[in-house]
Each structure stands twice: as C-alpha cells, then as structure tokens.
Image (spheres, helix red, strand yellow):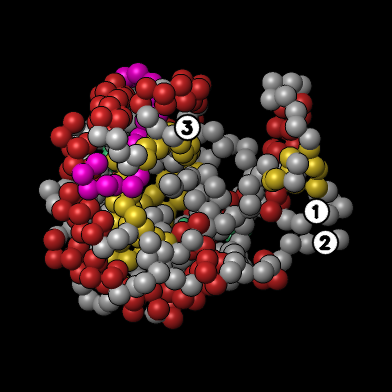
Amino acid sequence: MATFDPATQPLPSPQQGAGLRKVHLEITTDCNLDCKMCIRHAWRETRRSMTEETFAAIAAELRELPTVETVQFGGFGEPTIHPGFLEFLRTVKEAGWRAELVTNGIALSPDFADRLIDLQLDQLIVSLDQAVDSPGGVLHPEAELVKHNLRGLFRRKFLRASSRPEVAVEFVATAGNIEVLPEIKRLALNLGFTRIVVSNLVPYTLDSCDQILYHHWTSARADGRPSTWNPGIDLPRLDAWSKASAVIERLQRSGSNLTILGSSLSGEGQRCRFVTEGRAAIDPDGNVSPCLALLHDHEYFFRGQRRRVRAYRLGNVNQQSLAAIWADPAYAQFRERVLRWQFSPCIDCGGCDLRESNESDCFGNEFPTCGECLWAAGIVQCP
Ligand code: SF4
Ligand code: SF4
Ligand code: SF4
C-alpha cells in the first residue's frame, strides 16, 4: 500500500526557501476599532507601537538583503493610526520595495487616499466582511464608512489617472455572513477592488466557535498520494448547483483525493506560505518571527478545543542584524523542518493533548510545532 512520507518529498526550489523576500511589519498593536473577533482579546500584552529608531534599523538592515522585494504593513493592529506610518511608507517606496498595506479602512479619508496615491502604495488590502452596518456581531463594524472611503479612493485614483494602489478586500467568512459574499463581489464595480481574499474566522472566545465554517474539513489524507485505500478521483466540470455538489461535499468530508481537470479540490495539504515564500514578521519591538501565527503568545479554539500558541522569536533587530537573524542555524533548521513538513498531522487528529499547544508533537518535534497550524492548513489566508 502506498503511504505518504514527507521526508521523501522533494523540497521546494532554493529560490522558494533561501532568501528573505517579504517582511510583514507590525508597526503597532493598537487599533481604532475593537472587533469582537480580534486576536488581541486573546493576549495579555500591552498595546505598543514601533519607534522611529526601530523602523530605521529595519529599513537599514533590509537594504543589506538584496532578496527583499515586499514590505507589508499589517500584523495585528491598525498601521494607519501610527503617526509615522506615511513616512515609513515613503522610506519603503524610496528604497524600491513593493509596499502593501492591510487596513480596516476607517482612516481612508480623501486626504489620506491622496497621500497613498502620491506615495504610490502598491496594494491596499481592506477588511470588508459585511455589506451594510450590522452592529453587535463578531466581524468588522463600520461597513458603510469603509465603503464610502473605498468609493472615495476609487474616484481619486480615476481623477488622477493612477492605477495604484491596487485594492483587494479581505473577507472573514462565518456562518453569519457567508451568504453576503456574492453581494460583496457586486460592490467591486463601485468600490474599485479587483480581488477578494476570503479567510476563516478564528474563534478566540468559546462563544464564537459556532460561527466557523470548517467543522468537517480535513487535510491529512488529501495531501497523500493516491492509494488503494484512498484512490484519486478526477472530476470533469459539473454544475455547482446540481445533485453532484452534495456528493462532492460528502467525498471531501471523508478526506478523498479530489481533482477537477487535474487541479486539486482539496488544496495542497499542509503547506506554510510564510516559509516557502521567504517571508518573516517583525513586531513593534523589533522581534523577528517566521510568520504572523508565531508573532504573539495567544490562545484560540479549534473545533471547540482550546489551543495555546507560544510566540517564536528568533532575534531582535535592535540587537542583531536581520541578515544575521535570518542566517542563524536555529532559524535555518526551523525553515528546513517546515519545508520538509516533518510535523504530526494534529489538525486532523483528535488523538491526544499535545495538540493543545505548539510545544511538542508525537513525531518527536519540540517547540515550535506546526502540525496544528491553521495557516499552513489553508484555513487562515494572509494576502
Ligand atoms: S480592525 Fe483588526 S486589529 Fe482592529 S480590532 Fe478589528 S480585528 Fe483587531
Ligand atoms: S506552519 Fe504555521 S506556525 Fe509554522 S511557520 Fe508556518 S505559519 Fe508559522
Ligand atoms: S500529537 Fe497527538 S493530536 Fe497530534 S497527531 Fe500526534 S496523536 Fe494526534
């Protein structure tokens, strides 16, 4: 019988893992909103912002790394409320890097939109998961204000004949709002966005667990090679509304290897985009982590079960150069472990209590373990 052995899988090409290409810069953990779903409710940290000195150190160190292409202002906080944000953006653009901004869209006044156009921000990713204001839910509030701001930015871009920033919408999908997605899509014509990135709700409180849309989803068997116990099923095009969709859903729930015209319907199995795409994240104090998921200590619930995530910090840019942190053997070995995906499949297994934290797993891995990572499982997406 064929079995899946990650250790024998070919590694991604050196270009995919070797150089630092994208930095997620968290310049503040403060925000002008207080969404019920926010990860910051699952922290004990105090809110803080990056100093100009730390940002200057990062910018200088990034210049020493020729592989760097993109700086994304984001993380867990609202970058636009940092008083130095526009100057930071100017520095990034003057250095020749692609600049991206992840924002809740509250601060996008006409003046602010003009500044983003002046500075040639490349991509703006705005949270919009409701078509109209509906206070009291777990999602981002103020949908009407955000739509108004996006319309204003679209108009400013048109009047100034600017194609930048390209606008994408980030939609957090829940049981309560998934039916709104087609309506959000229709808004693109008026609001000027060209992409919707749908991610899932991560419940940080027990009472929001019933809102998730991944109760029955599985990955482990889907990333295996076809075998006699789980043969590949290659589908033709089918009507999405036909009887077939119920059957396909049943097959997906049981972890079948489904492809449609050769493309996987189950995704790629567990794969970490942060590591394979050469990304790293930096918090407001200058601490470097391999990804957003490991940037802060926090807790969340996965299918009703509490999980604790301990942050993994490889160094601090105020004490060591980013190049030295990236080249550190501990960091290089961790990236290698992630590329080879040598973790146990906790995401699909209810087997033991080890899945309650990222401290160790049943394959013998020690902290940090990634087998329970929602990002690598494709449940959470980051643009
Ligand atoms: S906009 Fe983002 S950072 Fe701010 S409260 Fe909402 S989820 Fe948290
Ligand atoms: S697998 Fe998850 S926790 Fe591990 S490095 Fe990637 S994003 Fe971070
Ligand atoms: S560590 Fe526990 S939960 Fe994870 S795969 Fe092994 S038995 Fe399952």
For label 1, the residue is: 226
The image shows a total of numbered marks equal to 3
Instruction: Give the left or right position of residue 24, taking residue 34 as reference.
Output: right
Seen at 48% across and 72% down, the residue is 18
Residue 259: x and y, percent? Answer: 74, 43
Instruction: Give the left or right position of residue 332, taking residue 44 as reference.
Output: right
Residues at marks 2 and 1 touching, judged by CB atoms closer than 8 Å:
yes
Q: Main secondary structure of the magenta part?
A: loop
Disc ID at residue 37: none
Q: Amino acid at mark 2?
A: Ala
For label 2, the residue is: 2
Mark 1 neighbour class, 10 Å CA radius: few under 14, some 14 to 19, many 20 or more? some
N-terminal label among 1 and 3: 3
Seen at 83% across and 54% down, the residue is 227
N-terminal label among 2 and 1: 2
Residue 361: x and y, percent? Answer: 56, 64
Seen at 44% across and 34% down, the residue is 194
For label 3, the residue is: 173
The verdict on label 2 being within 8 Å of ligand 3 is: no
The verdict on label 3 being within 8 Å of ligand 1 is: no
Mark 3 neighbour class, 10 Å CA radius: few under 14, some 14 to 19, many 20 or more? many
Q: Which residues are magenta?
A: 117-134
Instruction: Give the left or right position of residue 288, taking residue 224 as reference.
Output: left
